[in-house]
Image (spheres, helix red, strand yellow):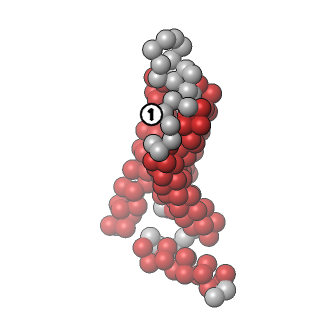
Amino acid sequence: MSDATEANRLLEFYRQYIGDPDRAVDVYAGFGLFFAGLALGAAGVVTFLYSATLPPNTLSTYAVREVAAVAGSVGLPALLVGVVVLLPVDRRMLFVAAAGSVVCLGATALFVWAYPQDWNVVTPPDYSARGVAVYSVGLVAVIAATGAALVAHRVERAT
């Protein structure tokens, strides 16, 4: 099969379930982000499960768990932003989703910087509460944009 045939199938799938796309790049970017986020989330879970087979409290175990946490924390917003990009919504929702993703990436960078020595420890400094709070704010923005996009799409389909 040629790439053009596969691309047409993707666009036909989009037309069947969502409608006529405004731009083909939105379809490709949306599906790409969605499946990349799904793959990163699955890789994070598998990597974390692998870390359970390693000796506890070693540097390699912490490194593998850090990779797992980063994959999962980047994958979830990517998956949700993929939905926002796929649906024909107002550009403001794209900006809200992008801003939330940037906040999530900032929180992930804080995690990478602080883990393991300053993350979830008894002695100060402990940056885990700050990191989770910042990530939560970003994720709420992404979820709000995704929810608004889904509701707007359903309202548009109903009318």
Q: Residue 147's x, y, as percent?
A: 39, 50
- Which residue in the rendered view is the most extreme toward the left? 158
For residue 69, above or below residue 83 = above
Name the residue beneath numbered marker 1: 136
Residue at x 42% of width, y 73% of height: 17
Q: Quadrant of residue 2?
A: bottom right
Residue at x 48% of width, y 33% of height: 56
Q: Nearer the viewer, residue 77 or 151?
A: 77
Q: SS of the residue at dot 1?
A: helix
Q: Is residue 146 visible?
A: yes
Residue at x 43% of width, y 54% of height: 149
Q: Residue 62's x, y, as percent?
A: 55, 34
Q: Is residue 85 visible?
A: no
Q: Is residue 77 left or right of residue 109?
A: left
Locate the C terminus by quadrant.
bottom left
Q: Residue 114's x, y, as percent?
A: 59, 25
Q: How many marks?
A: 1
Locate the N terminus by quadrant.
bottom right
Residue at x 55% of width, y 76% of height: 11
- Which residue in the rendered view is the most extreme toward the front? 55
- Which residue in the rendered view is the most extreme toward the top? 124
Q: Residue 109's x, y, as percent?
A: 61, 33
Q: Is residue 109 left or right of residue 13?
A: right
Dot 1 alpha-carbon crowd within 10 angstroms: few under 14, some 14 to 19, many 20 or more: some
Tell me the amino acid under the disc marked 1.
Ser
Q: Is residue 113 left or right of residue 131?
A: right
